């Protein structure tokens, strides 16, 4: 690895000597994580540790980076902690004020290693795909179904892989946070999705209001499932073993069948990654899994004679009347 990437602290009122020491320490941590996990991150250009994450993302927009790569998460579901950005063949990692607090706190410091590893793993994944799986980046789709679902499928793989690679640096805090986030989203599903679907079906809210909530919460839960399975498969657990140890259950929930299907697909995807990756078939299976998940909720997206439609149907879960 070429270690000439920069670590830049953007913290006001910080002594210059302390700033230099902190930058050097953080750089050593990054290099060590890269070596331990055998990550291909030679495209890493800079790591920015900021006390104003939102402002830093705004500044990066001024460099010409696409806004879609600089989304700022603070929507009641979670707050962004870190982000890796691919720009003109170089990678930038931005670490937020939340990361800074965790890094500076003895009780949470080790959990930041897992966060760093997750972001570096995104870079590793992009570089491997650039070498072996360039077709992964194709975003021109011939039909409406692929156009809607493949971006979600690819993002799910990306987050699964990043957590999978970072799993050896998990702390109990990291495990609990991922677990709690998934089950919070799952347990609130009736309130966030089915209550609104019922309201739409009974004429109390317009379709766009329901679809806005659906886009936020249904996709969020699917994404959290990818994070969770990255941890589980990364530590060589099965979903059943993990749920038993965590004294948790998904039986009878909207995610029961979906989560087991995703577990099988992700295991298959990892078997020959990256140079002999059977990604085309398994990504298609993950797309079908996502479509079935939407159908279980009662949302069917379709295209008829070039026109897009959304059918909101009754389902086997949630309100039925």
Image: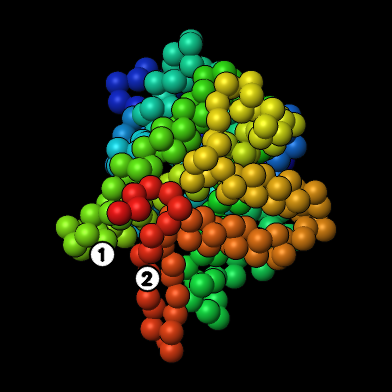
Pointer 1 local density, CA inside 10 Å: few below 14, some 14–19, many at least 20: some
Q: Residue furthest front?
A: 321
On residue 310, the disc is 2
Residue placed at 23% from the left, 54% from the top? Answer: 199
Q: Residue furthest left?
A: 204
Residue placed at 48% from the left, 61% from the top? Answer: 295
Viewport quadrant of the N terminus: top right
Above or below residue 248? Residue 108 is above
- Confirm or deny contact between disc 1 and disc 2 (CB under 8 A): yes
User: Exactly how many numbered labels are in the figure?
Assistant: 2
Pointer 2 local density, CA inside 10 Å: few below 14, some 14–19, many at least 20: few
* Left or right: where 78 falls relative to 174: left
Residue placed at 45% from the left, 75% from the top? Answer: 302
x, y (%) of residue 208? Answer: 25, 63
Nearer to us in this view, 53 or 153:
153
- Assign a secondary structure to mark 1: helix
The residue to which callout 1 is attached is 207
Q: Residue furthest bottom?
A: 305
x, y (%) of residue 172? Answer: 57, 18
Above or below residue 23? Residue 258 is below
- Assign a secondary structure to mark 2: strand
Q: CA distance from mark 1 to mark 2?
A: 9 Å
Tell which circle, 1 or 2, labels the residue nearer the N-terminal end: 1
Residue 259: name its quadrant. Answer: top right
């Amino acid at each position: 690895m070429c270690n000439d990437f920069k670590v830049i602290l953007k913290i006001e009122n910080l002594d210059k000597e302390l700033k230099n020491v902190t930058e050097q320490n953080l750089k050593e941590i990054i290099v060590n994580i890269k070596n331990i996990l055998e990550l291909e991150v030679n495209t890493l250009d800079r790591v920015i540790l900021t006390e104003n994450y939102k402002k830093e993302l705004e500044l990066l927009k001024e460099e010409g980076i696409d806004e879609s790569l600089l989304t700022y998460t603070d929507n009641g579901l979670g707050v962004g902690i870190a982000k890796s950005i691919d720009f003109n063949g170089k990678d930038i990692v931005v670490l937020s004020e939340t990361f800074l607090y965790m890094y500076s706190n003895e009780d949470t410091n080790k959990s930041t290693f897992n966060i760093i590893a997750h972001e570096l793993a995104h870079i590793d994944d992009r570089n491997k795909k650039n070498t072996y799986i360039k077709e992964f980046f194709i975003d021109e789709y011939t039909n409406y179904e692929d156009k809607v679902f493949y971006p979600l499928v690819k993002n799910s793989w990306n987050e699964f892989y990043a957590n999978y690679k970072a799993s050896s640096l998990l702390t109990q805090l990291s495990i609990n946070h991922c677990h709690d986030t998934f089950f919070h989203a799952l347990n609130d599903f009736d309130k966030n999705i089915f209550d609104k679907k019922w309201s739409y079906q009974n004429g109390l809210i317009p379709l766009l209001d329901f679809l806005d909530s659906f886009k936020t919460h249904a996709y969020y839960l699917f994404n959290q499932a990818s994070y969770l399975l990255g941890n589980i498969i990364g530590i060589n657990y099965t979903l059943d073993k993990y749920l038993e140890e965590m004294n948790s259950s998904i039986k009878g929930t909207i995610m029961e069948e979906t989560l087991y299907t995703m577990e099988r697909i992700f295991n298959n995807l990892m078997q020959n990654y990256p140079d002999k990756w059977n990604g085309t078939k398994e990504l298609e299976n993950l797309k079908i899994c996502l479509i079935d998940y939407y159908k279980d909720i009662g949302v069917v997206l379709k295209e008829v004679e070039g026109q897009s439609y959304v059918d909101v149907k009754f389902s086997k879960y949630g309100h039925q009347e």
